[in-house]
Image (cartoon, helix red, strand yellow):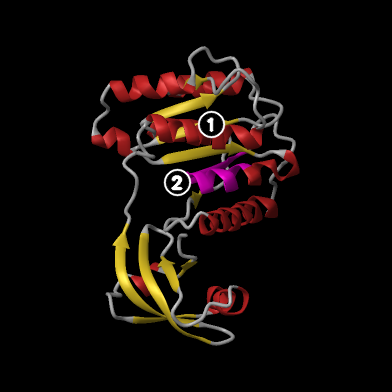
């Protein structure tokens, strides 16, 4: 079984080497000591949320902190082909379910999208509080999956903002029920074209609409910006399901799970 994961700031972990002791306090330390009830001799992983993992052993605990000894330092780095999920705001917390599941499956970044047909609206304070709530959701998903890296959460974007993301991507995909080519086929064709390392590093952007679907104007704008439509399967998936399903397919087709 994998070790439980706790997060600390990069500047706290970056200089540590095997044999060093580290005190984990604050909310993470209290959770480790009082909720997880970790005790001396148990293994834990300390991560910085950006790809650095320290394999550690607990040496002591009190009610508010945990002390660990660093046994090994494992920089896991960034994937060769980063994945970004552009998730339309959806009702009933389905957008949060989507990004949580996608995080567990390996997404690298999520961007909230105010689509034309999104019932949920982030206005005024919500435009600030919404992304913060998403950060909490992906952090919880990353911890559940024992990830060393926590996905980045972007600011709320509209159609123009999504077009900018498309223009900067190596491959941009509109997950759409009217698409002709399957997601797997589009991914294989892109990979067969042997994109260079720079293009791969620009990553894959996958765009998921709200439960009312994307408007034709949005799809046209995304295509004009360089995105391709792709079909996930024969059935129509919910907004909360499409993104995670796409992460699975693309992870397999683009070699991230090999």
Above-or-below relation of 100 to 165: below
Q: Residue at left 65%, top 23%?
A: 236
Q: Could you say which quadrant of the image residue 159 lies in?
A: top right
**Residue 248 locus on image (x, y percent):** 49, 35
Above-or-below relation of 163 to 147: above
The residue furthest top is: 180
Q: Which residue is mark 2?
A: 108
Q: Which residue is mark 1?
A: 207
Q: Does the segment drawn in magenta span residue 99?
A: yes
Q: Quick one: 94 or 43, which is closer to the camera?
A: 43
Specify whether residue 151 is in view: yes
Q: Quick one: 22 or 119, which is closer to the camera?
A: 22
Q: Residue at left 74%, top 40%?
A: 91
Above-or-below relation of 164 to 214: below
Q: Could you say which quadrant of the image residue 87 lies in?
A: top right
> Relative to 88, is 256 on the left or the right?
left
Specify whether residue 159 is in view: no
Q: For the residue labelled by badge 1, is the local secondary structure a helix, a strand or a loop?
A: strand
- Magenta-tinted stretch: 98-113
| Sequence-first tag of 2 and 1 | 2
Q: Does the segment drawn in magenta span residue 120?
A: no
């Amino acid at each position: 079984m994998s070790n439980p994961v706790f997060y600390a700031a990069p500047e706290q972990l970056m200089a540590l080497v095997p044999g060093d002791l580290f005190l984990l306090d604050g909310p993470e330390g209290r959770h480790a000591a009082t909720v997880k009830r970790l005790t001396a001799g148990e293994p834990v992983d300390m991560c910085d949320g950006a790809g650095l993992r320290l394999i550690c052993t607990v040496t002591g605990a009190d009610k508010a902190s945990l002390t660990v000894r660093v046994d090994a330092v494992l920089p896991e780095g960034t994937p060769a082909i980063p994945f970004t999920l552009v998730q339309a705001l959806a009702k009933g917390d389905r957008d949060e379910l989507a990004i949580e599941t996608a995080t567990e499956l390996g997404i690298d970044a999520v961007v909230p999208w105010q689509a034309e047909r999104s019932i949920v609206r982030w206005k005024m304070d919500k435009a600030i509080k919404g992304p913060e709530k998403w950060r909490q959701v992906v952090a919880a998903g990353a911890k559940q999956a024992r990830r060393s890296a926590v996905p980045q959460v972007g600011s709320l974007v509209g159609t123009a903002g999504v077009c900018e993301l498309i223009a900067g991507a190596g491959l941009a995909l509109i997950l759409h029920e009217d698409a002709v080519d399957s997601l797997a086929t589009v991914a294989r064709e892109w990979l067969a074209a042997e994109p260079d390392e720079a293009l791969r590093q620009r990553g894959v952007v996958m765009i998921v609409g709200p439960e009312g679907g994307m408007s034709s104007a949005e799809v046209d704008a995304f295509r004009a910006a360089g995105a391709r439509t792709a079909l996930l399967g024969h059935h129509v998936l919910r907004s909360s399901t499409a993104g995670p399903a796409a992460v699975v397919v693309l992870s397999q087709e683009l070699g991230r799970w090999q």
